[in-house]
Amino acid sequence: MKLEDIKNITVLGAGAMGHGIAQLCAVAGYNVVMRDIEKKFVDDGLGKIKWSLDKLASKGKISADMVKASLDRITTTTDLKESVKNCDFMIEAIPEVLKLKQDTFKEVDSIAPKHAILATNTSALPITEIAAATKRPEKVVGMHFFNPPQMMRLVEVIYGAKTSKETAEITYNLAIKLGKEPVYCLKDIPGFLANRVMNPPGNFLAWLVSEKIFTPEEIDSTSHFKLGNPMGTFGLMDYVGLDVGYNVQKFFEQREPPYKVAPILEEKIKKKELGVKTGK
């Protein structure tokens, strides 16, 4: 298969990452099916896509015709079989739970066309173990976007142990067509490249807060005003969702002792204070 053969893209998940990825694909000219487990989730995701496209149009970045054309290319559903039965390329953006992803890939593998590439947007979980749930591990690849995917330019393209060069190259070139700057991750290690760099320091800073050495405000002020980062460390955690980062942190804890998640993160998760998405 070649990049030019991709016409239909399925995005599994209509949440923060899924709806943004679906928007990118539609704007790039692909027919998109966006699927989630409940109608309220897909409706909410589609509403956010409309809002985002209208905002881009109001700033003169895209035309009103482009907004309409992009929305016309998007179909939503809660039916997994319907969502993948005609796909050429699937991008999974469901919660960061390994067993959930494996079960999903196993089911999709039994339905999707044999030529279809199955990509996961996981930020840390092993591509090799997700691919093992399918009968096409050579066509399973990591395609990790960053939040919000409409704005962040980096995309990691991650090889699993059996990912073919053709699959990885098509995924890399698709990322370019979506307006991104992809990088290859040739080794399937926990956290790949970016989260290998970003997550441990964030957890270290959370330990400093847990031990009452610094406050979140002091750390974010330093990160933003002194180091020049667009957002403070904890501000970014709040924006992305503490549960997303927490699942990655717990994976590191399980796979790479003596890594240990900071108590304040455990406390926030227990109280369901997840940041912007919960208002706390």
Image (spheres, grey):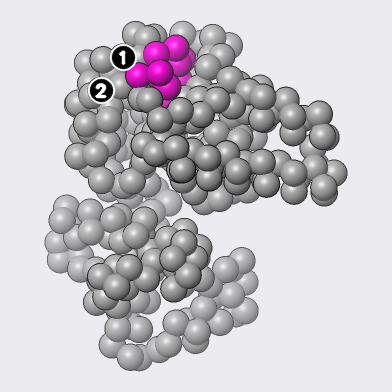
| Residue type, label 2 | Glu
Q: Would you identify the image quadrant in which residue 254 lies?
A: bottom left
How many numbered discs sit on the rendered protein? 2
Q: Which mark is residue 111?
A: 1
5, 257: nearer the viewer = 5
Q: In the orientation shown, which residue stands out farthest toward the bottom?
A: 213
Quadrant including the C terminus: bottom left
- The label shown at residue 107 is 2
In this rendered view, identify the residue nearer to me: 259 or 236.
236
Range of residues picked out in magenta = 81-91
Is 251 colored magenta in this rendering? no
Specify few, some or many for label 1: CA neighbours under 10 Å numbering under 14, 14-19, or 20 or more.
some
> Three-letter amino acid code at disc 1?
Ile
- The answer to whether one can see residue 153 in this image is no
Q: Position of residue 244 (x, y in %)?
A: 36, 56
Secondary structure found at label 1: helix
Residue visible at 34% across and 60% down in the picture = 243
Crowding near the residue tagged with mark 2, few <14, some 14–19, many ≥20 C-alpha atoms within 10 Å: some
Residue 151 at x, y = what percent?
Answer: 63, 48
Q: Is residue 88 magenta-colored?
A: yes
> Which of the 4 image quarters holds residue 37?
top left
Q: Secondary structure beneath disc 2?
A: helix
